[in-house]
Image: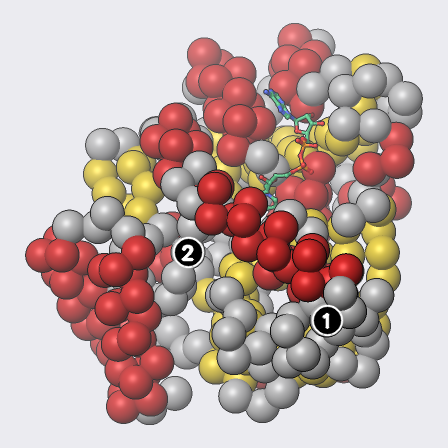
Amino acid sequence: MTLLGLLVYLLPLRLEASLSSDWDTRAGLWAGLSSCGRLLFSRQQYHLRRLLTKILKKQVLSPGIKRFELDAAEIARKALPGQFVVLRVNEEGERIPLTVADTIPDRGILVIVFQEAGKSTRLLGSLCEGDTILDLIGPLGRPSHIEKFGTVVCIGGGVGTPEIFPVARALKQAGNKVISIIGFRNKDLILMADEMESVSDELIVATDDGSNGTKGFVTDMLKQVIDRGEKVDHIFAVGPVIMMKMVSKTSEPYKIPTVVSLNPIMLDATGMCGVCRVEVGGETKLACVDGPEFDGHKVDFDLLMARLRTYLPEEKQSLELFEAAQKIGGCCGGKGACHA
Ligand code: NAD
């Protein structure tokens, strides 16, 4: 992307962020300028696809969870475990950040898995094979730090499981003993158990209600692994914020380094707007460029949870309007992308 292109892309986002967040303007501008500097002088290259991105394959993994294979060769060639992309379905669309669930570089395929949680992800999920997405940028964020730690526990909670999969695979390839723990509310929501098993030395499946695997939370399973005398050298966890908080609380007394992948509200995703700021070790960090992975023992999870609740009334209203429009025959006001 050229410098001019980058500024043209980022300037409206900066204004949008000022209007829509409680971000102090001076601090925001400073963060914006310093990130712009970092972008200009770093060697990181994003691909902003202004070409329409085609959905090559669509699968429903479990109720409300969809997997798309996208035709996005430049991103598929570069994306590393832990990185994410941002997409917009159409011109009026919200920017949706999604962790890269997998890539098939030789076929130019980027895989995303998402939960239909609000209007924008419902709209995305309504698209079919052959349909296109307006724009896609990535790979974004810092990749996971992969090395031979020894024994690593990889924890996926619900729809966080597809995101932990490439991390677990890379850790296994780096020579680690990988113990994976994946947790779901019930058996119908279990995702990617076979894939996780294929990259793990041991896979523990947990369900909250005991309908499959062992009954309990992922934190109960982690405690059991530690208590049976396993020397755990590192933990990676992706899932609901409360889960990542409890995993970090569980591992802290044992001083096991614990990496969590944060998912705050995000706008431009290149460090300009500051909307995705999080507190880590008393410092303000931007999840999009400093993360999304951070030391779980230092993250202020309560602040993150409070900030994630900021727009809940608006999100609820937006979903209600979307559902009402769908009932009268046009999910997106006649702007295309209306599929069951
Ligand atoms: P969920 O609520 O069904 O929980 C999944 C599992 O997490 C549970 O089965 C349990 O084992 C564990 N868990 C939940 N609450 C816990 C607690 N209090 N203590 C210990 N363990 C607990 O999850 P879901 O509905 O599939 O996930 C939805 C959330 O995950 C969304 O909020 C989404 O934003 C988030 N998510 C985050 C990322 C990321 O990058 N961090 C990626 C995908 C999804």
Secondary structure at badge 1 equals loop
Question: How far from the left and from the top, in percent, is residue 213?
Answer: 87, 23
Q: For the N terminus, which image quadrant?
A: bottom left
112 sits to left or right of 17: right
Residue visible at 32% across and 70% down in the picture? 13
In-front residue for pair 17/47: 17
Relative to 179, say whether 38 is above or below. below
The residue lying at 39 percent from left, 32 percent from top is: 306
Earlier sequence position, callout 2 versus callout 1: 2
Q: Is residue 327 left or right of residue 90?
A: right
Q: Foreground residue, 121 or 273? A: 121
Q: CA distance from mark 2 to mark 1?
A: 28 Å
Q: Nearer the viewer, mark 2 or mark 1?
A: 1
Rendered residue at 53%/16% (across/down): 250
Q: Position of residue 117 (x, y in %)?
A: 64, 48
User: Can the viewer see residue 120 in this picture?
Assistant: yes
Q: Which residue is mark 1?
A: 330
Which residue position is annotated with label 2?
266
Dot 2: what SS?
Answer: loop
Of residues 234 and 331, which is closer to you in this image? 331
Specify whether tag 1 is near ligand 1 (CB below 8 Å). no
The quarter of the picture where the C terminus appears is bottom right
Determine the residue located farthest toward the front in the rendered image: 328
Q: Amino acid at mark 1?
A: Gly
Quadrant containing ligand 1 reads top right
Q: Residues within 10 Å of mark 2 (few under 14, many from 20)?
A: many
